[in-house]
Image (spheres, grey):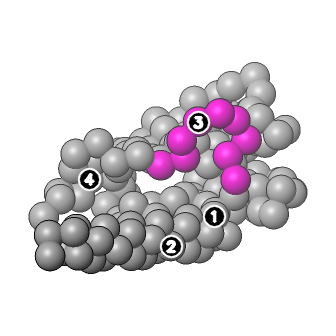
Amino acid sequence: MAAKKKTVKKSATKKAVSKKSTAKKGTAKKAASKAAAPVGPYTPVVRAGDWVIVSGQLGLKDGVMAKGVAAQTAQAVVNLKARLAEAGVTINDVKKTLCFLTDMDTFATFNEAYVAGFGKSRPARSTIGVASLPASGQVEIEAWAYKPLR
């Protein structure tokens, strides 16, 4: 009798593990299709307690860099929103962004596209001029969002 109970428990456990694995795989596939793949060996989005940190997002879509600062900024924000969604937060939860531009003379153009992408949300922000970015990008946007776990 004891042996039968043990067998049933093992079978139920295998089914539960199998369902968890399938759910995780399905989620990963869905998430990967919405945001650009990372261009390096890093985690694109992590949750650290109540904070969600999104690694710098470029203006890449399907492996192709958008043309120009405005288009790259718009696509970087689309990618940022997709990464935020993976962690269950929105652009309205973003409290700080760190932005990189390869040409500070494009600051006004960048600002217009940034405002369009962020809507009414206005997180604290730093913008830094850099010599270059991965994949010949002109714009990169990193974000820190705050959303308490419940």
Q: Give how far across and how far down residue 72 sits, in percent.
A: 74, 55
Q: Is residue 40 magenta?
A: yes
Disc 1 + disc 4, Cβ < 8 Å: no
Q: Residue at x 73, y 41 (%)?
A: 39
- Residue 109's spot in the image, x, y percent? 69, 54
| Inter-mark Cα distance, 1 to 4 | 23 Å
Q: Relative to 9, say whether 97 is above or below.
A: above
Front-most of residues 89 and 14: 14
Of pointers 2 and 4, the one earlier in the residue sequence: 2
Part of the protein shown in magenta: 37-45
Quadrant where the C terminus lies? Answer: bottom left
Mark 4 surroundings: few (<14), some (14-19) or many (≥20) residues within 10 A? some
Which residue is painted at 84% across and 38% down in the image?
136
Q: Indicate whether residue 95 is drawn in magenta.
A: no
Q: Which residue is mark 1?
A: 32
Q: Which residue is mark 3?
A: 42
Q: Amino acid at mark 1?
A: Ala
Query: Viewer-proximal residue, 138 or 29?
Result: 29
The mark that comes first in sequence, 1 or 3, is 1
Which numbered disc flags the more N-terminal residue, 4 or 3?
A: 3
Q: Which residue is mark 2?
A: 22
Amino acid, disc 3: Tyr
Badge 1 or badge 2: first in the primary sequence: 2
**Residue 22 sits above or below residue 79 on the image:** below
